[in-house]
Amino acid sequence: MTGSGGIHVTFWGVRGSTPCEGDQYARYGGHSSCVSVECAGEPSVVFDLGTGLTPYGEALGGAGTRFAGTFLLTHLHWDHVQGLPFFTPLHEPRSNVDIFGPRQAEGPLEEVFDGLMRPPYFPVRASQLGATVRWHDVGDDRFAVGDSAKVRSHFVRHVGATVGYRLDWHGVSVAYVSDHGQGCGAAPTDDHVPDEVLELCDGADLVIHDAQHTAPEFEHKRHWGHCTHEYALHVAREAGAKQLALFHHDPSHGDDMIDLMLEATRDLSARTSGPEVIAAAEGLVLDLGGPTHTSARR
Ligand SMILES: [Zn+2]
Ligand SMILES: [Zn+2]
């Protein structure tokens, strides 16, 4: 928690598709999608449960630590759920968590997730975790978390049922649209931004957005459900966001490639009166809306 007010955002996993390891990922990191959000005096909120959830659990104190908070899950692809069984505070009976995730055509979220986390794929079922776990199916919804944080969810274009989120807390806002494909669906043009996405990102202090592809890559992968870094900037600029974090980095992109994509996006933003642009990196901490309003790397 921050004792000074504002929202404290920590990137624990920034990679899409699959976790990866090697010297070429040393600066941006190899864990898959997971971002924690701490609002002063509120229970923790976590966007997505990729492998970055494991070091988050260890940072909280590991096994035996009591955890109370909210998980906002965008969808059930492996890179967004694989960390859940390894979040050791959930093996502590005093822990309790609310998991919000997209409504599934196949049935209630809790039942569908049980098909993912069960023998022979994993020895422990979600229902056998020691913690109290409450599941919530969402779509285009509004709901409260903790005492005073407000969350907006919308279905977004991807492969399978997927939502994006916006969290508002005392005038500070974070939008999280981790997987969003500009080539999915029947959009009139590749730069079309759906109203639902604009609403999530509207004037946000920070937009964390899918930026997996370069434009040439996108031409071959438009059906994968992800977008270009230029499109991520287009979304943030159209929505009037203050800061954009390029997110869901492709496993084939090492640190130097992400540097190039960041530099190109910053140049484009400067030429088009866009927002500040950063590339999400494992361990990066952003303090939004507090007295100092600083950004810092761990
Ligand atoms: Zn993903
Ligand atoms: Zn996905």
Image (cartoon, rainbow, N blue to C red):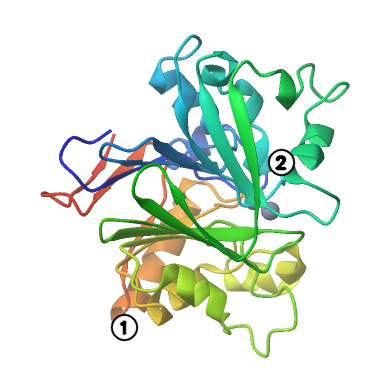
Q: Residue at x 72, y 46 (%)?
A: 77
Q: Position of residue 123 (x, y in %)?
A: 79, 16
Q: Residue furthest left?
A: 291
Few, some or many residues within 10 Å of mark 1 (<14, 14–19, 20+): few
Return the residue nearer the eye: 234 or 84.
84
Q: Position of residue 196 (x, y in %)?
A: 55, 75
Tag 2: amino acid: Trp
**Nearer-N-terminus badge (1/2):** 2
Say the numbered circle drawn on residue 271. 1
Q: Quadrant of the C terminus?
A: top left
Return the residue nearer the eye: 74 or 55.
74
Q: Nearer the viewer, mark 1 or mark 2?
A: 2
Specify whether 145 is left or right of 190: left
As displayed, is residue 200 above or below residue 64? below
As displayed, is residue 7 above or below residue 183? above
The residue under label 2 is 78
Few, some or many residues within 10 Å of mark 2 (<14, 14–19, 20+): some
Question: Which corner quadrant of the image does residue 190 belong to?
Answer: bottom right
Tag 1: amino acid: Arg
